[in-house]
Amino acid sequence: MALTKSQLHNYQLACVDHIISHNFCGVFLEMGLGKTVSTLTAIEALMFDYLEVKSVLVIAPKRVAETVWEEEAAKWEHLQHLTFSKIIGTQADRYIAFKRPANIHIISRDNVAWLCTNYGPNLPYDMIVVDELSSFKSYKSLRFKALRASRPYTKRLVGLTGTPAPNGLIDLWPQIWLMDMGTRLEKTISKYRETYFVPGYGSGHIVFKYVPKPGADDIIYEKIGDICMSMKSSDYLSMPLCTYNNIELRLTPELQKQYDDFEKESVLDFIDGQDEGQINAVNAAGLMNKLLQFANGAVYESKEGGERITHPIHDIKIDALDEIMDTNPDKSILVAWSFQSDRDRIMKAMSKYKPRELKTAKDINDWNAGEVRLMLAHPASAGHGLNLQSGGHIIVWFGLTWSLELYQQFNARLFRQGQTEHVIIHHLIMQKTSDADVLKAINNKSTMQNALMESVKARIEKYKFMMR
């Protein structure tokens, strides 16, 4: 039975009014507050009541574009007459979908540059909705540049996200620019940085982090407050309990020595291969990935010609996951994996549970129907927009992510509106390894790049001192 418009919460109706009354705005709803149905309700009113909008483009993460928007409309009586066309698939498929008449066209954010390149900046839409606006936080990205060129021709734009500044307030400029073309937070990123920030740390002329000037955050919030609406789920919803459980694991003495030697050699290789001051997030991530792979149980070796060999080391985390499955015999478990070797090893070792990898709409439907005992998903592909709360209430992080945004978004697949069970989030943490650094970064709400850099720097200084 379809839901009715009268079942919308008051805060959702406030969001609808905000979108209708502001041609360009941001709706910063925390995960689980129902930003999709609120936006669809505003679109429906603008189309059929106010007659201000004829065509809408929704830009979303790929999996969200494939499933979430049309499925959400089907749940609500007042939205079921809306028509959709999904601009996804091959170039030929995208062209056909673009030409197909529909109230709402939906496109993956990865194809925004393609759309603007092929059809010009003056797109045939009265309104653009950017779902997960924070994915446009890089002013250097092709997707931002493409949408920026289209912005002067756009009559309405709505930015939706629960994490508008995952790496700090420096990320806000591109997102707010898409709303007001620089009216509130300066015309250029350089002017924005100059006005509100000072360099935090860097190397030579390269600045790795900018920090707000004293009081700058309050000024920024005040400047964007008229067009950005922000809410937290705890203020409006009676949410279930959520428990975070660190499962502390230990390497055997032999494996711990092997790990320590591996860490030492990796860092020494890193030092030898890098001149002082050339550390950056890319090579820091490469070093840290080696250590995290070891902690998870298998390490990649790259060969000439691009071949990559996986070397299994231990099954300690595999055994811990099996124990969780065994102690929850009637529960469905959602597992977050980090490396492909983790996924492959879990699929093989847990074959008795008939594990699935979250890839398609059928996987989502089967999970929510309780037909999947063990579902594997990568945080980057299942971190935004998917409604998985009907299928289970237990998450296991086989390997944690450095990205606070992906971590929060992934957990919100189960800990969100509609969840009726006590949500339990397990972290498999290998003691005396880099797992502790990632957990610390998450607990401190550190950004990915900052946490990586600090962790690698600490290791370099440690081994430099030992070499003296």
Image: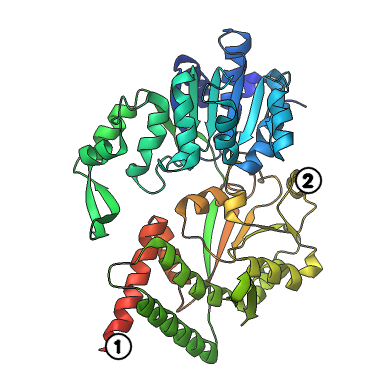
Residue toward you, 256 or 411: 256
Q: Residue 385, image x and y in percent?
A: 60, 41
Rendered image coloring scheme: rainbow
Point 72% across, 40% down: residue = 90
Going by the numbered disc 1, the residue's amino acid type is Met
Name, please, the residue furthest toward the left: 214
Query: How would you rate the neighbour count of disc 1 (Cα within 10 Å): few for under 14, some for 14-19, many for 20 or more?
Result: few
The span from disc 1 to disc 2 (Cα, nearest Å) is 54 Å
The C terminus is located in which quarter? bottom left
Q: Check the image and report above or below for 104 versus 349.
A: above
Residue shown at the point (78%, 46%) measured from the top left:
362
Does residue 103 appear anywhere in the picture? yes
Q: Nearer the viewer, mark 1 or mark 2?
A: 1
User: Residue 362's mark?
Assistant: 2
Tell me whether the residue at label 1 lies in contact with that at label 2, contact meaning CB atoms closer than 8 angstroms.
no
Amino acid type of the residue tagged 2 in the rendering:
Lys
Q: In the rendered image, which residue does mark 1 sit on?
A: 466
Dot 2: what SS? helix
Q: Which mark is residue 325?
A: none
Q: Position of residue 379 (x, y in %)?
A: 58, 54
Q: Quadrant of residue 117?
A: top right
Q: Is residue 105 left or right of residue 128?
A: right
The residue nearer to you, when weighing 100 against 68, is: 100
> How far from the left and from the top, in percent, is residue 308?
63, 73
The quarter holding residue 341 reads bottom right
Seen in the picture, residue 85 relative to 172 is either above or below; the reply is: above
